[in-house]
Amino acid sequence: MNAAALRQSGLQAGLHLNFTEALGREGLYLPLGQLIRACWARRLDPIAVRGQIAAQLARYEDVMGRVPDYVDGHQHVHQFPQIRDALHAELAARYPAGGPRPWLRCTVAASMRGMPPMARFKAGVIALLGARSQCRHARRMGFEMNRGLLGVYGFRGGAAVYAVLLRAWLGAAQPGDLIMCHPSAQAVPDDALGDQRRAEFEVWSSDEVGEWLQRFNLQIHRGVSCRPGPAHAA
């Protein structure tokens, strides 16, 4: 991990809230299906949930030396019942309105024009797992969010398939939309998505992406806003 290089890069960096992979740490970590059932049944210990969120935010601040630019969730757990309520409460307490505040990822599906059926289905399932409730509550508390989410697919197909999908996402992007992506120049050992991460990196670093951005009159912005603005992909 090179936090200094990340801080100096000018890129936004944020907390990818985690409740499903322990990664050798103690805490409240459950397989995704089990976590979904526990959240919807309100069976999680509220104190443990908020404590884990606070610990992960504190760890981010210790490593990066600043407030996270955004907060989202590994496997979109930040929008699940119980977790979202604790997250919003902890963020409001740590980062009062008027000072630096993270923005939050909204997973409401943006335009699915040109997307294959499985990608449409997966985007719909993600949105059903709490997207609209999360967005309503977060905006009532004054947190900024992206308008809609693009970039959902099955993480397979190599660069050729990803290029087709990315062109369609860029063509459908509206002001305030966010494109989720997972590129990596190198694969991490034992990462099931390693090959597809490299494929995404190959496409994003290609000359074609610059041409598509010009063709669709898009700009990649450093942040997002729930307020209207120029068309962009973030």
Image (tube, helix red, strand yellow):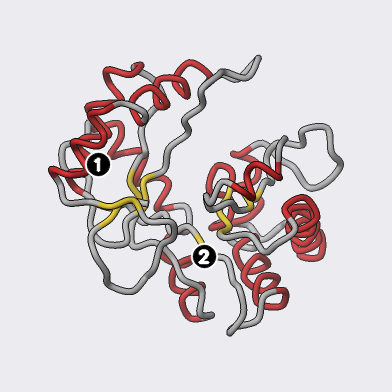
Figure check: 159 above or below 62: above
Residue at the spot of label 1? 169
Q: Check disc 1 and give the amino acid type.
A: Trp
Figure check: 87 above or below 31: below
> Which of the numbered marks, if any, corresponds to residue 15?
none
* Relative image position of residue 75 (x, y in whole percent): 55, 42
Q: Nearer the viewer, residue 109 or 4?
A: 4
* Relative image position of residue 93 (x, y in whole percent): 71, 78
In terms of secondary structure, where does tag 2 sit?
A: strand
Residue 55 as seen in the image, left or right of residue 222: right
Figure check: 20 above or below 82: above
Picture quadrant where residue 120 is located: top left
Name the residue rendered at 17%, 44% in the picture. 214
In terms of secondary structure, where does tag 1 sit?
A: helix
Residue 201 as seen in the image, left or right of residue 184: left
Q: Residues within 10 Å of mark 2 (few under 14, many from 20)?
A: many
* Relative image position of residue 232 (x, y in whole percent): 28, 55
Picture quadrant where residue 71 is located: bottom right
Please say if the residues under marks 2 and 1 sit with CB atoms less than 8 Å apart. Answer: no
- Image quadrant occupied by the N terminus: top right
Residue at the spot of label 2? 103
Q: Check disc 2 and give the amino acid type.
A: Trp
Picture quadrant where residue 206 is located: top left
| Residue farthest along the front direction in this orientation | 8
Q: Nearer the viewer, residue 121 or 149?
A: 149
